[in-house]
Image (tube, helix red, strand yellow):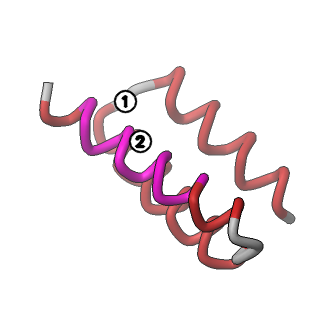
């Protein structure tokens, strides 16, 4: 359960940064989330974080 909460934390922090117009900070949070999702082999979250990063590039 903790791992899921950690992924949600990265997602929420990235979303907050993006809402405030801090695109680079949002990308940084999403990259951290992507790395964590990859370490867990969580394919749905890998896809989600990857898509979010591409949105900001």
Say which quadrant the C terminus sits in: bottom right
x and y percentages locating residue 27 in the rendered image: 64, 66
Up-down relation of residue 37 to residue 35 (above or below): above
Q: CA distance from mark 2 to mark 1?
A: 5 Å
- At 84% from the left edge and 51% from the top edge, which residue is drawn? 55
User: In the image, which disc is placed on residue 3?
Assistant: none
**Farthest-out residue, left:** 2
Would you name the residue on which mark 2 appears?
A: 38
**Does the residue at mark 2 contact the one at mark 1 (Cβ under 8 Å)?**
yes
Query: Does the magenta run of residues contain 12?
Result: yes
The secondary structure type at the circle numbered 2 is helix
Would you name the residue on which mark 1 appears?
A: 41
Say which quadrant the N terminus sits in: top left
Closer to us: 22 or 47: 22
Residue 43 shown left or right of residue 5 in the figure: right
Which stretch appears magenta? 4-15
């Amino acid at each position: 359960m903790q791992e899921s909460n950690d992924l949600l934390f990265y997602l929420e922090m990235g979303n907050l940064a993006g809402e405030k117009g801090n695109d680079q900070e949002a990308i940084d949070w999403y990259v951290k989330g992507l790395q964590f999702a990859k370490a867990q082999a969580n394919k749905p979250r890998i896809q989600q974080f990857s898509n979010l990063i591409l949105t900001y590039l």
